[in-house]
Amino acid sequence: MKKLLLLLGILYSISTQAQVRLQGNVIASDTKEEIIGANLYLVELRRGTLSQSAGKFSFEEVKKGSYMLQISHIGYKTFTQKISIKSDSTFQIALTPSAVSLEEVIVSGSASKTVVKESPIPIAALSKTQWLQSGSTNLVDAISKLPGMSQITTGATLSKPIIRGLGFNRVITMHDGVRQEDNQWGEEHSLHIDEYSIDRYEIIRGAGSLMYGSDGIGGVMSVISILPAENTPLAGNILYNYQSNQGFHGVSGTLVHNQNGLLWQARFSMKDGQNYQNKYDGRVWGSNFNELNFSGIVGVQKKWGYSRLYFSKFGQNINIIDGQRDSQGHFVKSVLENGEETLVTVSSQELEGRAINPSNSQALSNYKWTSSSLFQLGASSLSFVFSYTQNHRREYGNIFRPSEPDLYFFLQNYYYDIRLHLPERNQWETSIGSNGLWQNMNNKGNETLYPNFNLADKGIFVFSKKKWNNWIVSGGLRYDYRQLNISQLYVDANGKFQTSPQGAVEERFSGLSNSYSNITGSLGVVYKLNSNLSLRTNTARGFRAPSVPELSSNGEHAGTYRYEIGHVNQKSEVSLQTDIGFTWENRQWYLDVSWFRNQIQHYTYSERVQAPNGKDSIINQVPVFRYVQGNALLQGLEATVNFTPVPWLSFNQSYSMVKGINQQAINDSSKYLPFMPPARWISQVKWSKKTWGKYVENVYFLAELEHHQTQNQVLLAYNTETITPAYTLVNLGTGMTWRNKDKKTIASLYINVNNLFDLAYQNHQSRLKYLDTNPTTQRRGVYNMGRNVSIKLVVPIH
């Protein structure tokens, strides 16, 4: 006991060593005028504040040492610099005007800290301001235009992130340092995160991130919530979002307080949207939804570090789009007439309505409690994250029992993450840590898609970075172990699957207890050839154990409108990815190019099952899909060019492509992997003005051309996919901020028009593309959203 008390005393003494004050002001480099509202962030301490009147800022009780300081503000290039603080220090920082941010930002997801241009792993980021300037319809849609990113969609509301052609369990989503686990294996399973609460997205492309687990062979999407700035009395803001296509209304309000080391934040958000529409389908029946979310943070931030408690409740109700039509091409729905199920035409009033169909919808809810702490131990730091999540997924599809879910997945997650960031020595930065996950899933619905299961993940890792002269070398190793126990699956006299042996006539799945383990690693180099040009390369080995649905599915999935069959002998996927790229920049030009090659053994995908007569296999009037495996090769290119001839004008061009090959294919029809995004070009011109008169600031106008090439590299075998024609969208945007005579923000307005010319098109990664053919027009499936005007108004509460 005495030794324990002595150790605690030493740690306390180290953590409360001499504190200093960091202060200064932020100005514009061209006019020397003060900048109010700039965001300042000390990365290692994870502390942020805003510049106030006269551009002044301050951080109280900062421990002596070296820290990376990041400063950003709309209309200016992001500032990053390492500063050394040995006593009370005052800085004057000048921001360079820029019409577009080139994202020279710190990314916390790849290691303890990383500047994008110093990372051998391709990284992209999206800020709150960039999100506000977009016309996105959901949180994944917001980042789908970043290089290497795309999305698999089920209408305008449900999206899954795709990184370099890989998604689902191959992409790890982190939410405030916690793995987001909400049955992400499903194509129609959205991420249960409040879009309005997000301050920043960070995207790591490829398997180079060792920090969060084994499954991220495609990459990592890290979502970071807004935190109240230091020295903030009671304040907040109200955001209102209107979107014309769905008659969509969204509202989010937040109150925050952060003074004297004590902070709290409370947020309320809601969304409500009608059925979306396009030129060919009119209103799309079954695409309306509503959402209601709550979240809060309480915490303390003192000399020793910080400790925060997070709570969030996500709730969403979504109708299911099945695409069924009558002989006239009108959408139909199931109703009961004289105790019999029959199809009737959906009325125009119903198409314009907002009601949730109790017999063809999803009810989703997610509850999360998280404890996050950081302790400063001299020049080292130790962080802890512990989280518990309940995820409820109810899918309704029975007209005879509309209030009872056919499928009800009750998923519980316990997550931990412990990291020790060692002090920098001779330009070496090293982090070691461990994280893991325990899951328990129980079926509570009337039907069963796959059995109950328990899963336990444990992993340890070490990551280091070394700088010398013009070289930056970084890499690490990780070991993961997974124990998976899947229960038995039974069938009753009516052929329905169930998890209980009671009333069963046959055992269909005997259960499975198996373990999976592997070592993964990453090694990369950045070489700064000169002040303008940097070369980089990285090689990473990834690993993904098979998911429960891939092993044991054997039932109709109401949300996807198909029957799914797994295979108990699925093997773990193992990937080897190589990245080569360069960045060149000067005051006016920015060019970034990345090429990658990703070889995956035992790649798992689903394909349609054909009956002996060569036609599609059908069970219960829905098509049958099965999970199969084969070696795969994915190769691609991502490029971004930005030209800023003057500070108020910028031209941006990006290009992304990926090609996925099934190396086990026996003929050309099965040569390509499914759901690969087509090559895409995005051209944008943006004009901005910092001030417009006395009270208007940050004015901008942008025009964008978004071209998706024809996707003819598709999985034609078994009628799994079809070729998707090329299409081009034109998008516009504008916005501004009003301030009063004291330069306090009154309101900010953002207006976007997506698909200006109301083009009718189908994205290759839209699941609705493969629904039934319209008997009148002979067009198959349902088309994407038509013209959509988005208006966002943000009003601060001072």
Image (cartoon, grey):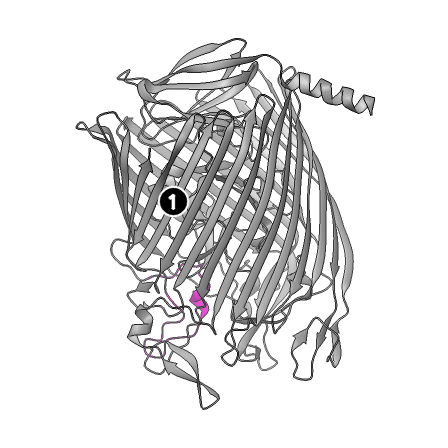
Side of 317 where 436 appears, left or right: right
Residue 51 visible: yes
Side of 288 where 519 appears, left or right: right
Could you say where residue 512 lies in the image, as x and y percent from the top left? 77, 62
* Residue 149 on the magenta span: no
Could you say where residue 150 lies in the image, as x and y percent from the top left? 46, 50
Could you say where residue 15 lies in the image, as x and y percent from the top left? 64, 19
Pick the residue in front: 258 or 697.
258
**Snapshot quadrant of residue 747:** top left
**Magenta part of the protein: which range?**
761-783
Pick the residue in front: 533 or 294.
294
Could you say where residue 31 lies in the image, as x and y percent from the top left? 26, 17
- Label 1 Cα neighbours within 10 Å, binned few <14 / some 14-19 / many ≥20: many
Pick the residue in front: 341 or 743.
743
Determine which residue is flagged by label 1.
Answer: 253
* Residue 779 on the magenta span: yes
* Residue in the picture at 49% in, 65% down: 362
**Snapshot quadrant of residue 371:** top right
* Residue in the picture at 35% in, 77% down: 346
Q: Count of labels shown?
A: 1
Residue 288 position (above or below residue 402): above
Q: Residue furthest top?
A: 87
Pick the residue in front: 300 or 398.
300
Residue 571 visible: no
Describe the element under mark 1 as helix, strand or loop.
strand
Q: Quadrant of the N terminus?
A: top right
* Residue in the picture at 53% in, 19% down: 67
Q: Quadrant of the C terminus?
A: top left
**Prevailing secondary structure of the magenta residues:** loop
- What kind of residue is marked 1? Gly
Residue 392 position (above or below residue 428): below
